[in-house]
Amino acid sequence: MKKRFQGREFEYLFRQDTKIILWGSANIGLRFLDFYAKHLNIVKLCDGSTEKVGTQVGYMMVSDPSEIVYDESTVVIVTCSFYQEIRPILEAKGFRHHVSLFYYDDFEEIYRLYIHGKLCSHRIDISLTERCTLKCRDCNMWMTHFREPKEQPVEDVLNDIDLYFSTVDFVREMELLGGEPLLYADIAKVFRYVREVYTERVGKLVLFTNGTLLPSQELLELM
């Protein structure tokens, strides 16, 4: 790719001499094409479905992905949910992940930063407690291995959230985790704080529970 400058590494994506190819012409691709057509130099739309190749989508004809050829001025954005399957195919052609090859979700984070000056994040996980109601052998959080489960003081949790949003403008999903987070005595206080202070900056607030406890009435009302 062309020379990129420190702090503006992705500016080349928005240049008119950068040719953007989209791989995926279903719902995601359609929405992406409709919105970004006026911001990007989109030159080709591809799809792995033989039924879609040769059909018209928006203002573009759908091409076969075999027509994608690497050169230094070409960037491919995968506008479907099969990025991990498509990535090695394009890397074999010479495209590089996060240089000339992007998943649409990742690209949209870059777009918000460069065009709107907003730093957005996919997700943040906040662990509240190591205590749990179960002792699952294959716990992915390794909670069964803690001999003396501990909790984060609620003041530390709220300070961590403030610190996070001092840098990040918006997060799509904030997950409150355990152990079992419903064992955390101040869970309602955390929910209330996020709702009252950061509600416009959190797309979805998620409580990741194993379903063995009932939320309090206060927490249900906050939800």
Image: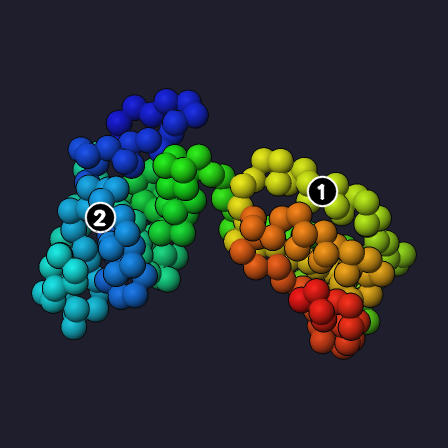
The quarter holding residue 110 reads: top left
Q: Quarter of the image containing the N terminus?
A: top left
Q: Left or right: where does residue 22 sit relative to residue 167?
A: left
Q: Left or right: where does residue 23 sit relative to residue 126?
A: left
Camera-side residue: 220 or 111? Answer: 220
Q: Does dot 2 land on a helix, a strand or a loop? A: loop
| Amino acid type of the residue that numbered disc 2 sits on in the rendered structure | Ala
| Amino acid type of the residue that numbered disc 1 sits on in the rendered structure | Asp
| Coloring scheme used | rainbow
Residue 91 visible? The answer is no
Please name the residue that numbered disc 1 is placed on: 160
Camera-side residue: 121 or 3? Answer: 121
Q: Percent from the top left, x then y, of residue 188?
A: 77, 61
Picture residue at 18% right of the left edge, 33% below the top: 17
Picture residue at 36% right of the left edge, 52% below the top: 104
Q: Percent from the top left, x then y, of residue 56?
A: 12, 64
Picture residue at 54% right of the left edge, 41% below the top: 169
Camera-side residue: 106 or 171? Answer: 171
Picture residue at 71% right of the left edge, 69% below the top: 221
Q: Tell me if residue 72 comes above or below residue 29 in the rendering.
A: above
- C-alpha gap between disc 1 and disc 2: 39 Å
Q: Earlier in the sequence, mark 1 or mark 2?
A: 2
Q: Tell me if residue 163 comes above or below residue 153 in the rendering.
A: above
Disc 2 residue crowd, few under 14, some 14–19, many 20+, Cα 10 Å: few
Where residue 177 is drawn, which disc sits there? none
The quarter holding residue 130 reads: bottom right
Q: Percent from the top left, x then y, of residue 28?
A: 32, 61
Where residue 37 is drawn, which disc sits there? 2
Disc 1 residue crowd, few under 14, some 14–19, many 20+, Cα 10 Å: few
Q: Does dot 1 land on a helix, a strand or a loop? A: helix
Residue 196 visible? The answer is yes
